[in-house]
Image (spheres, rainbow, N blue to C red):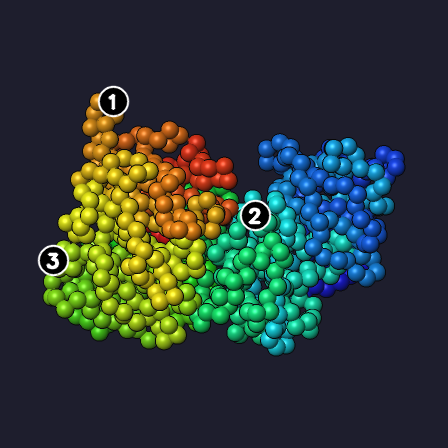
């Protein structure tokens, strides 16, 4: 290739100087670059590159002169970390997934992600580890530097809309057929979603280094569901191509990746509209074809993605409500877990936040994430059930929605259609795309007047109603979202205690018309609810935490119940009940343990089956001969194809080895729990609240999960002194997600 070339990427263009001569630096869009180094010839076509210092790079591949020649043996690369100075293990370079064509094209391998590196070593070996002879001429290593220049369209690797293709107009009409594959690089499986943008840039550079104008696929999807635009060449091919970042020969693709893929293929507004019966996958991915086809066929497939990524870096973020202090603290996720140094404190007195703080507002009593305005950033819904209105209605309550990425603009609203005084709207909130229009909507509930509910459809109507016919207040509301019948529309479950103190579960079902009250289920409610696909059948299941037998029946120490989802929605058939006297669950069932006071659902081991974390803040311990009443603990239960199991369960408390803390009376460890992937590596970490810690100051403990198991030695304690919450604020009372 010679001269300059223009690559169209979304709404902008970027020029790059194209050169294929090994040993030269090719600069792309400002600070990104491809640097090539020719391998040394040791005779008989044996070629390698000894360790040497380099400019910074983050990925590497081999290229050679003849695009039709084949490499002999296995090409391997190792890199030196620019941060630690340590050399990596040898990584095998994967076979290339595309065929270079045209003048100036080169043969090559696929690329591997090395991370930020400043040294390289390359070898090409036979099965016995000796140098392989007969390598093609011009064998060179291409070192790919993705840069950090966000001012360049190429460097930014703009995230495309999963609904409409983000502006790529290669297909004038419905695609008809689709091809889904993966990048095939095992190193991509260890990539954080925070690095996906940079990896996307190196995937472009991989093609450019081999003389191609860009990727042969239309979209690239990472495990967190981020969608990146691929080729923008105006192709009139009637097949849409999608590539998943990673090697899924053995690892299952994530739910977020599957749903993003389905939204692209459905493509109602982007002109793709692939036929579910004409989707092609390579052999190692074909087991996932029925799931993708079912998602494409679902009427609500174009729903807004579930997200808590407010700053758009590709990693989920965490919010902690401290209603006693009328505040919410947002802790961003990052490649290494929560970034406490970048925490954000929000009150009603913060710039841009509607309203002002008054004692007793309870701002932060309930919180939920979702993309309400459809701009790709998660927004935060915050309940303030004690908020008085300007007309003198005490405790009318309100809900405030703040827009990401800044969380300093948004709107606030209060009750409609129900009695205002004492309504306490915002006692529970949930966010999801109830009507499948691509933007999330807000559900909220109040405890006054027999209980009320409110649904605010983005760009649509607001509806409301009463939970019961009683006049007395309900209590303990908690809401969860999920797709219980697999139609693509988000449903809502609202748990509450009726005026008689009995746990109830109200169901609201989503459809193209919005959210509809579907009545009260026949099962007992409790104090907490969460949803996720525990058995991997494509339908979300409901977990109900029932900590107190006086409210829910059952064992003295509390239990959880799991209701399966199905094509007809939630069903009591196959309901599972788990308590601490179950074989395989650590501890014993004792009155006051409050097992199930908090629950969360997420896939901690990335096996495709959602797991359940259960808080028991009333658990007692004896240490050093002293009774530590209500010290608390949390139990992790695994999801399987047959549902939730106690086999392999894992229990944590503040005396667990590796956790730098200790059980104390009244800590209430497990007052809140969250299974959230705060590192973007595909495994949810464990976040456990301890609202009674340090005389009510509170605490959050974050334990990461790696491919080798729990990272107990890397547990992080997020204290009030770290996050800046006031004394006595009970940090750890409320978490989202």
Provide the secondary structure element on which disc 2 rests: loop
Q: Nearer the viewer, mark 3 or mark 1?
A: 3
Q: Residue 490 or 149: which is nearer the viewer?
A: 490
How packed mark 3 is, by other alpha carbons closer than 10 Å (few <14, some 14-19, many 20 or more), is few
- Residue drawn at point x = 22 percent, y = 53 percent: 526
> Which quadrant, please, contains the N terminus?
bottom right
Q: Mark 2 = which residue?
A: 250
Q: Secondary structure at mark 1?
A: loop
Q: Position of residue 669 (x, y in %)?
A: 28, 39
Instruction: Please say if 15 is above or below 77.
Output: below
Front residue (pair 409, 328): 328
Quadrant for residue 74, please give it. Answer: top right
Cα separation between marks 1 and 2: 47 Å
- In the image, residue 461 sits, relative to residue 552, either above or below, namely below
The answer to whether the residues at label 3 and label 1 have Cβ atoms under 8 Å apart is no
Identified at 20% across, 28% down, the residue is 627
CA–CA distance in space, label 2 to label 3: 52 Å
Q: Which residue is mark 3?
A: 500
**Cα separation between marks 3 and 1:** 42 Å
* Contact, mark 1 vs mark 2 (Cβ under 8 Å): no
Of discs 2 and 3, which sits in the foreground? 2
**Furthest residue to the right?**
44
Residue of label 1:
624
Residue 421 location in percent, x, y? 15, 66
Q: Nearer the viewer, residue 626 or 353?
A: 626
Question: Is residue 324 rendered to the left or right of residue 305?
Answer: left
Residue 62, image x and y in percent?
75, 46
């Amino acid at each position: 290739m010679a001269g300059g070339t223009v690559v169209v990427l979304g709404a902008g263009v970027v020029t790059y100087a194209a050169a294929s001569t090994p040993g030269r630096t090719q600069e792309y869009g400002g600070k990104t670059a491809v640097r090539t180094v020719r391998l040394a010839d040791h005779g008989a076509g044996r070629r390698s590159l000894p360790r040497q210092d380099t400019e910074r790079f983050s990925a590497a591949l081999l290229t050679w002169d003849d695009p039709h020649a084949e490499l002999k043996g296995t090409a391997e690369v190792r890199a030196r970390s620019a941060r630690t100075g340590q050399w990596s293990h040898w990584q095998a370079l994967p076979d290339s997934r595309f065929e270079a064509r045209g003048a100036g094209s080169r043969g090559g391998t696929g690329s591997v992600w090395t991370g930020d590196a400043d040294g390289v070593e390359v070898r090409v070996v036979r099965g016995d580890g000796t140098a392989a002879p007969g390598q093609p001429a011009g064998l060179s290593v291409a070192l790919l530097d993705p840069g950090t220049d966000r001012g360049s369209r190429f460097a930014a690797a703009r995230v495309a809309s999963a609904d409409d293709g983000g502006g790529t107009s290669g297909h004038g009409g419905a695609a008809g057929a689709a091809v889904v594959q993966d990048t095939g690089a095992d190193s991509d499986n260890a990539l954080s979603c925070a690095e996906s943008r940079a990896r996307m840039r190196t995937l472009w550079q991989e093609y450019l280094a081999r003389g191609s104008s860009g990727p042969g696929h239309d979209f690239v999807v990472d495990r967190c569901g981020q969608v990146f635009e691929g080729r923008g060449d105006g192709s009139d091919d009637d097949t849409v191509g999608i590539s998943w970042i990673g090697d899924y020969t053995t690892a299952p693709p994530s739910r977020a990746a599957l749903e993003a893929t389905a939204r692209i293929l459905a493509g109602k507004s982007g002109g793709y509209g692939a036929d579910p019966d004409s989707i092609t996958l390579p052999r190692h991915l074909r087991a996932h074809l029925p799931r993708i086809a079912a998602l494409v066929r679902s009427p609500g497939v174009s729903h807004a993605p579930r997200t808590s990524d407010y700053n758009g870096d590709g990693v989920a973020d965490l919010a902690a409500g401290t209603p006693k202090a009328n505040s919410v603290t947002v802790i961003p996720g990052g490649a290494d877990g929560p970034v406490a140094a970048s925490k954000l404190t929000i009150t009603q007195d913060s710039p841009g936040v509607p309203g002002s703080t008054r004692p007793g507002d309870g701002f932060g009593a309930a919180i939920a994430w979702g993309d309400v305005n459809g701009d790709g950033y998660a927004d935060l819904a915050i309940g303030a059930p004690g908020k008085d209105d300007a007309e003198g209605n005490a405790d009318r309550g309100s809900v405030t929605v703040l827009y990401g990425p800044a969380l300093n603009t948004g709107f606030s609203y209060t009750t409609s259609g129900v009695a205002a005084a004492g309504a306490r709207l915002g006692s529970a909130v949930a966010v999801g795309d109830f009507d499948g229009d691509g933007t999330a909507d807000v559900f909220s509930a109040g405890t006054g007047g027999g209980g009320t509910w409110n649904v605010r459809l983005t760009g649509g109507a607001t509806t409301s109603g009463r939970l019961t016919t009683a006049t007395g207040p309900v209590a303990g509301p908690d809401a969860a979202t999920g797709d219980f019948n697999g139609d693509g529309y988000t449903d809502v479950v609202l748990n509450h205690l009726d005026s008689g103190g009995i746990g109830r579960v109200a169901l609201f079902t989503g459809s193209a018309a919005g959210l509809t009250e579907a009545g009260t289920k026949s099962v007992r409610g409790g104090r907490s609810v969460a949803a996720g696909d525990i058995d991997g059948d494509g339908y979300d299941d409901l977990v109900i935490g029932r900590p107190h037998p006086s409210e829910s029946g059952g064992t003295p120490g509390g239990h959880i119940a799991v209701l399966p989802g199905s094509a007809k929605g939630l069903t009591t058939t196959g309901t599972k009940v788990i308590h601490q006297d179950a074989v395989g669950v650590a501890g014993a069932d004792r009155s006051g343990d409050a097992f199930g006071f908090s629950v969360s659902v997420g896939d901690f081991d990335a096996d495709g089956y959602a797991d359940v974390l259960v808080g028991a803040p009333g658990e007692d311990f004896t240490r050093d001969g002293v009774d530590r009443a209500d010290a608390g603990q949390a139990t992790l239960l695994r999801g399987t194809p047959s549902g939730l199991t106690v086999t392999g369960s894992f229990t944590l408390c503040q005396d667990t080895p590796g956790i730098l803390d200790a059980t104390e009376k009244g800590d209430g460890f497990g007052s809140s729990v969250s299974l959230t992937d705060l590192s973007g590596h595909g495994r949810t970490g464990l976040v456990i609240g301890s609202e009674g810690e340090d005389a009510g100051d509170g605490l959050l403990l974050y334990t990461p999960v790696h491919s080798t198991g729990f990272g107990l030695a890397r547990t992080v304690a997020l204290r009030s002194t770290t996050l800046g919450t006031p004394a006595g604020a009970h940090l750890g009372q409320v978490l989202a997600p």
